[in-house]
Amino acid sequence: MWRSRDLTLFGKVLIINSLGLSQLIYSASILNVPEEVARTVKTKLFSFLWKNKRDEIKRIGLYQDLERGGIRMVDIDTMFKALKLAWIPRLLIPGNQNWKTVPDYYPRKFGGLNFLLMCNYDAKYIKSIPLFYRNILVYFNELKTLYNFDQVQDIILCNNKAILVDSQTFFY
C-alpha cells in the first residue's frame, strides 16, 4: 500500500518507525530475538526504504540525527539491545512482586543481579541462566566496555573473567 505512494526518505522512515517497528517492539522486549530474524527485519525495512533496489546511502549515515546529516532511521540491532537493557531498572526495583520470582532466581546463584552488574563478568562463564537474561548481561557488558566503565579501585574478585579457577570464574 505504501510502496505505490511517492514518499520521500523522511516519509518512509516515519512510516517504518510508526507503523512497522511499533508492531515489533513489545514482542522484541519480552522475547529473545534470533540474529537471523533481526537480519530479515533489517533487510525488509531497507528494501521498503529503497524500493527493492540497492542502498544509495551508507546505513551508518542513515542512523544519524538530522543535525549530523542522517534521517534518524532506527538501527534494529541497537533497538533490540536497548529493549533488553530496559529490563535492568525493572529488575533492580526492590520488593517481592510475583512477576520477579523467575528473573530473581537465576542471578541469585551468582550473588544477585545488583552484585553481578558490578562484577567484571564474562557471560560465557555464567551458565545455567536462560538466554534472555544472559543476553541482558552481555549487552550490559558491551555498554560498560563502550563507555570505558572501569573502576579499578572497586575490583571484585568473584565473577571476574580475569580470575579463573579450573577454567571457571571464581564465585564464593
Image: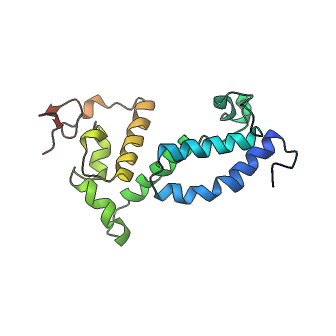
Query: Residue 12 location in percent, x, y?
Result: 77, 45
Q: Is residue 120 left or right of residue 78?
A: left
Where's residue 116, x and y in %? Answer: 28, 46
From where the camera sits, is residue 147 visible? no
Q: In this view of the protein, can residue 90 be seen by the observer?
A: yes
Q: Residue at x 68, y 53 (%)?
A: 20
Indicate the quadrant where residue 78 lies: top right
Residue 46: x and y, percent? 69, 40
Residue at 57% over, 56% down: 25
Q: In front: 73, or 130?
A: 130
At 28% across and 52% down in the image, what residue appears? 129
| In the displayed structure image, the side of residue 170 where residue 41 appears, left or right | right
Furthest residue toward right: 6
Query: As drawn, which residue projects farthest toward the front?
Result: 52
99 to the left or right of 109: right
Q: Residue at x 32, y 44 (%)?
A: 117
Give 142 or 157, whichever is nearer the viewer. Answer: 142
Q: Quadrant of residue 121?
A: top left
As drawn, is 141 to the left or to the right of 120?
right
Residue 22 screen position, x and y as percent: 64, 57
Figure label count: 0
Quarter occupied by the N terminus: bottom right
Quadrant housing the C terminus: top left
